[in-house]
Image: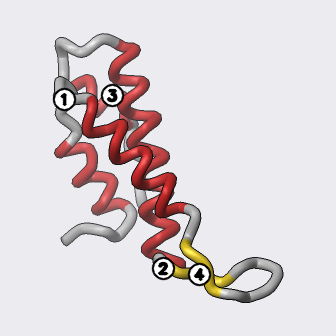
Amino acid sequence: MITAIDIEAELKADNPRATAVMIRLYADTLRIYVEAADNIAKNGAVCAHPRTGAPLENPYLKIRAAQAALLSKYRTINGDRVLAMLDEQHGNAE
């Protein structure tokens, strides 16, 4: 059984000086990033259009890129350990 990770609590443990707002924003952004990355891993960078079946770029690529850009701006938040935990939980560990 996979236990859900309390992302905010884990981030707070790694970033005790960060404000609650910064932790919440980072956690929300990280959740969306991981969801998009999971979709890309499952469906690929190119997927079939739901109605026509024609190949198209997976729309989650843009979502993942946008969230990655936001995460890179949170330079004062250390999310490495939490990302590793999420990767392990989602089967993306290297």
Residue that numbered label 2 is attached to? 44
Q: Residue at x 39, y 34 (%)?
A: 27
Crowdedness near tag 4: few (<14), some (14–19) or many (≥20) residues, C-alpha within 10 Å: some
Q: Earlier in the sequence, mark 1 or mark 3?
A: 3
Of badges 1 and 3, nearer the viewer stands 1
Amino acid at the residue labelled 4: Cys
The percent position of residue 72, horizontal first and vertical second, equals 26, 39
The quadrant of the picture occupied by the N terminus is bottom left
* Rendered position, 18 above or below 78: above
Residue that numbered label 4 is attached to? 47
The percent position of residue 86, horizontal first and vertical second, equals 33, 53
Crowdedness near tag 1: few (<14), some (14–19) or many (≥20) residues, C-alpha within 10 Å: few
Q: Residue at x 31, y 69 (%)?
A: 92
Crowdedness near tag 3: few (<14), some (14–19) or many (≥20) residues, C-alpha within 10 Å: some
Of badges 3 and 2, nearer the viewer stands 2
From mark 2 to mark 1, how far is it between C-alphas? 29 Å
Crowdedness near tag 2: few (<14), some (14–19) or many (≥20) residues, C-alpha within 10 Å: some
Residue extending farthest to the right is 51
